[in-house]
Image: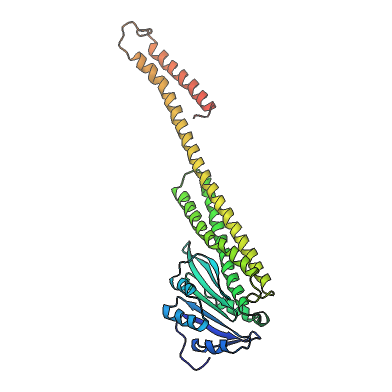
Amino acid sequence: MDNEAPLPACVVNCAAYDREGHRRDITLDAISDVLAADDGSFVWVGLYDPDDSLLDKLQEEFGLHDLAIEDAQHAHQRPKIEAYGNSLFIVAHTAQVVEGHIRFGETHIFLGQRYLVTVRHGASLSYAPVRARVEREPELLALGPTYGLYGILDFVVDNYQPIVDEFQAALDALEQDVFAETYKRDTIQRLYELKKELTQLRLSIAPLQDILAQLARAQENLVPREVRPYFRDVLDHVQRVNDATDTMREMITAAMGVNLSLVTINQGEIVKKLAGWAALLAAPTLIASWYGMNFRDMPELHGQHSYFVLIGVVLVVCIVLYRYLKKVGWL
């Protein structure tokens, strides 16, 4: 690296790549010198939560648009791609699972013919593995910064897949609880939380399809024809992840509906059983209350065996009623 001031802590990477795709670390002040030399090289700068002064310096070095810098400073942007002259500004959402919940971050990307600047905010894995991977293919990196952009977007999309797989496993486990004999309030609460997080994940994934489609057909002077198939490959991956997310959201909606239906059916069965037992108890109660009236000339009131006959009648009525209610499924 040039013998100048060390890089700020928020600058994760600052390197120049020559026309052969070989790397050379540089300082921020050396960026303008690299860009001034018309030798086919380009600069790749990686930042994590930079302050406004550093973004202002990069704006001066690369000639970045004011609106793009303003978005990068404030973060909380929707996924998008915008063209500013002969450069692109891309926002992609990143995601990580922390303690069973998705945490979202943002990556703001500035792409020009001779530069690639990535600005990470929030929950985001380092792009060091991406740089290491693309640097192992210097013949493709020699095509320009768009191959580095491909590596970043491919890394972002690939990190969605384990999240989708983890949520699929959680959904499979919750489906067992949905059909359990006993109702669990936690089951419906967890299903709701899963659907909420998957909806948020879809809001991050779905716009990437448009971003990648535009990159696959962008101007050839910005995205070389040789790199476009790579963007189409990432587009295919993100479409599959998006479809899987949509499928899971539909399955969760169905699971919540089934859970509610099962609870309603179970409550109906309980009410039927209570009604059956109430009817069974009503028969002897009616007979006993009938003979409990204080009338002098009631039938069998003074008979020697009337008490036992009444008990027998009550038992017969209860047995017949019980067998009938059992047959129709009320007991």
In the image, 297: left or right of 32?
Answer: left
Residue drawn at the location 67% of the way across and 76% of the way down: 224
Image label count: 0
Q: How far from the left and from the top, in percent, is residue 289? A: 35, 17
Q: Residue furthest bottom?
A: 3
Relative to 118, say whether 313 is above or below. Answer: above
User: Is residue 51 visible to us here?
Assistant: no
Q: Which residue occupies 49% across, 43% down?
A: 260
Quarter of the image holding residue 25?
Answer: bottom right
Residue at 46% x, 37% y is 267
Residue at 53 percent across and 87 percent down: it is 32
Closer to us: 117 or 159: 117
Rendering coords of residue 276 (x, y %): 46, 27
Q: As drawn, is 320 to the left or to the right of 219?
A: left
Residue 208, visible in the rendered structure: yes
Quadrant of the image occupied by residue 157: bottom right
- The residue most toward the top is 297
Q: Please, which colouring scheme is shown?
A: rainbow
Using the image, determine if residue 12 lies above or below residue 164: below
User: Is 123 above or below relative to 136?
Assistant: above
For residue 52, side relative to residue 145 (left or right): left
- Nearest the viewer among 111 and 286 is 111
In the image as oriented, which residue stretches furthest toward the front?
85
Q: Nearer the viewer, residue 99 or 94?
A: 94
Residue 62, percent across and down? 52, 82
